[in-house]
Image: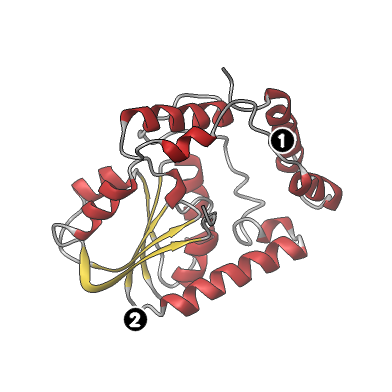
């Protein structure tokens, strides 16, 4: 049985396609996207009763992912739509959209994260799931040494395009966290690991955190920062 109403998922896809095709300044479209809600047609409450480390739970989560994304979940780096590098040359989304509320919200979020993290000057940062590089751009401009990971080749290309002229150019890698941790050089340790709107996309949160804290990947006083996640009282 399908979990989500496929008509509502299709409507969201249509709105996103309109925005990506040059309607980023259309406030009505963005308001419509903000108001639309997705009703679960199937039963999701049973997730709360499952062991989050069980195969049954993993199977259900994969079903949720596959219905929304439209393809099977994979840990391999993937190709996505080609980004508009010319449009993003003045900065990543939402700066290229010139939408006041969107830009303000991102500035507030990035500013709050940087303030609370209080990472040492010129510190080394691993950013997991950098997306189009909104946070990466700000961290690199501050002089941090950033390794920015994302499994999307196209999004990594966007980050490279928007940060190539900065004094401290980030190291942008099209890779999953597991692959990068296994193959990276151990010549340095990270002062901070940042998940900005990305921790939710990891299948096994416990093993992810265990892997980061083993084998000399981070400094003894390093910070692992999980930001902009949806956390509910239950």
What residue lies at 72% left-to-right and 55% top-to-bottom?
A: 97
What residue lies at 50% left-to-right and 45% top-to-bottom?
A: 155
Q: Nearer the viewer, residue 85 or 64?
A: 64
Name the residue carrying label 2. Answer: 120
Q: In the visual, does 7 lie left or right of 149?
A: right
Q: Callout 2 environment at 10 Å: few (<14), some (14 to 19), or many (20+)?
A: few
Name the residue carrying label 1. Answer: 12
The image quarter containing residue 124 is bottom left
As drawn, the residue found furthest toward the right would be 28
Q: In the visual, does 186 lie left or right of 202?
A: left
Height in image: 40 above or below 145?
Answer: above
> Does the image show residue 120?
yes
What residue lies at 71% left-to-right and 61% top-to-bottom?
A: 102
Q: Of marks 1 and 2, which one's residue comes earlier in the chain?
A: 1
Secondary element type, mark 1: helix
Q: Nearer the viewer, residue 103 or 169?
A: 103
Q: Callout 1 environment at 10 Å: few (<14), some (14 to 19), or many (20+)?
A: some
Q: Are marks 1 and 2 in contact (CB under 8 Å)?
A: no
């Amino acid at each position: 049985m399908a979990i989500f109403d496929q008509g509502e998922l299709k409507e969201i896809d249509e709105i996103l396609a309109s925005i990506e095709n040059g309607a980023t300044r259309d406030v009505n479209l963005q308001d419509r996207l903000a108001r639309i809600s997705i009703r679960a047609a199937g039963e999701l409450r049973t997730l709360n009763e499952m062991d989050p480390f069980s195969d049954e739970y993993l199977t259900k989560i994969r079903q949720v992912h596959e219905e929304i994304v439209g393809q099977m979940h994979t840990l391999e780096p993937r190709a996505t739509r080609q980004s508009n590098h010319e449009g993003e040359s003045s900065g990543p989304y939402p700066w290229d959209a010139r939408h006041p509320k969107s830009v303000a919200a991102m500035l507030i979020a990035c500013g709050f994260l940087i303030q609370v993290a209080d990472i040492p000057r010129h510190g080394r940062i691993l950013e997991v799931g950098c997306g189009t590089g909104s946070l990466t751009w700000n961290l690199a401009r501050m002089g941090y040494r950033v390794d920015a990971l994302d499994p999307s080749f196209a999004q990594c290309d966007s980050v490279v395009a928007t940060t190539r002229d900065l004094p401290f150019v980030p190291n942008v890698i099209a890779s999953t966290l597991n692959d990068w941790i296994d193959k990276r050089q151990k010549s340095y340790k990270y002062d901070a690991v940042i998940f900005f709107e990305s921790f939710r996309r990891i299948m096994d949160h416990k093993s992810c955190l265990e892997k980061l804290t083993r084998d000399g990947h981070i400094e003894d006083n390093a910070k692992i920062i999980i930001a902009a996640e949806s956390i509910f009282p239950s």
